[in-house]
Amino acid sequence: MIRVLVVDDSALVRKLLTETLSRESDIEVVGTAIDPYVARDKIVQLKPDVVTLDVEMPRMDGISFLEKLMRHYPLPVVVLSSLTPRNSETAVRALALGAVEVLAKPGSSVTVGDIGKELVRAVRTAARARIQKRTPPAADAPPVSFGPLRTTHKVLCIGASTGGTRAIEEVLRGLPGDIPGTVIVQHMPAGFTGPFAARLNGICAQQVREAQDGDIVVPGTVFIAPGDRHMLIERDGGRYRVRVRSGPPVHHQRPAVDVLFQSAARAVGPNAVSVILTGMGADGAAGMKQMRDAGAWCIAQDEDSCVVFGMPKEAIKAEAVDEILPLDKVPEGIVRALQGMMVGA
């Protein structure tokens, strides 16, 4: 049984979330809290497996509480945030602090009925997450260097889901600013991917942007797939372009890692390095297998460093992986693969 504590200042939202979760036979709402101070006491008393957390609350905002919680009493947290530009930026901050997922909060334009299945899925995912104590960041290690080698015709493809925002940040910060053109799918709702890209752009050496249809993939630039849109890569003469499309979800996801990886297998082939990071489910495994069969070098994050060892595990089972690395060694593995490809070119 998954024990859940619901934290929200709205009595109506607390009631709706409790009713939605309590319909599931494997989930029990063990308590609710009106603000972080009440939540703190109930966490100690009730020892929930998962906390759902509102962002905007009296006395202490949800982000300040999340930061304290991750430092002193780490728990899987699902954040609910209203879909406004300011709250979207706050939601991305929550993911960076260690929240497992962020969902659109029920309100005037979003109802519990709209997110009921997503809420249940997120709580179940969070219950399986491996949450580590949040410590102040140490001084950044210098990025791995490529040296004088050119990377113009290479492409780096990355896919991630649960826990992926922090994993992607760590990978990019470990790489130099002149990395090959990079395309990333992170499972994230529409409205959150723009602020996520903007946050990465402010802290990473590369130029990071939310992808737009027709963008040219060039060294030093990272494209994040927009929420609720698939991202593909295609060859355009002597260069690559990204394509942003609608279309049905794949593995219940849009954007889907498989869509990106399968397009990279067709368009980039042996000039690609593929990385699959922490996440629930099997998205990316089939596409990575196609990339490996096309000659790409494929890296999976190892189990111990994953928040959820789902997507990498499925890729490994599919024999789609050349190398399994802890998260802090992934940047080095990327550079080593690219250097080997360029030496052999």
Image (tube, rainbow, N blue to C red):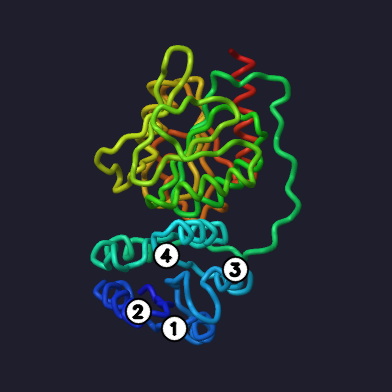
* Front position among marks 3 and 4: 4
Classify residue 257 by image quadrant.
top left
The quadrant where residue 85 appears: bottom left
| Residue 177 found in image quarter | top right
* Circle 3 residue: 67
As displayed, is residue 279 above or below residue 206?
below
The answer to whether residue 85 is above or below residue 275 is below
> What residue is at 42 percent from the left and 77 percent from the top?
8
Q: Quadrant of the C terminus?
A: top right
The residue at which mark 4 appears reads as 81
Res. 218 mark: none
| C-alpha span from label 4 to label 1 | 16 Å
Vertical order, 173 against 10 (above or below): above
Near mark 4 (Cα within 10 A), the count class, few <14, some 14-19 or many ≥20, is many
Task: Compare residues 310 and 221 and report the one nearer the observer.
Answer: 221
Q: Amino acid at mark 2?
A: Arg
Q: Residue tagged by mark 2?
A: 14
| Sequence-wise first label, 4 or 1 | 1
Does the residue at mark 3 contact the one at mark 4 (Cβ under 8 Å)? no
> Marks 1 and 2: in contact by CB < 8 Å?
yes
Q: Earlier in the sequence, mark 1 or mark 3?
A: 1
Q: Are marks 4 and 1 in contact (CB under 8 Å)?
A: no
Disc 2: CA contacts within 10 A as few (<14), some (14-19) or many (>=20):
many
Instruction: Give, as a three-letter code, the residue at label 3.
Output: Glu
The N terminus lies in which quarter of the figure?
A: bottom left
The mark that comes first in sequence, 3 or 2, is: 2
Using the numbered discs, state the Cα–Cα distance from disc 3 to disc 4 in whole angstroms.
16 Å
Name the residue type under label 1.
Answer: Ile
Label 1 secondary element: loop
Q: Amino acid at mark 4?
A: Ser
**Residue marked by disc 1:** 34
Which of pointers 3 and 4 lies earlier in the amino acid sequence?
Answer: 3
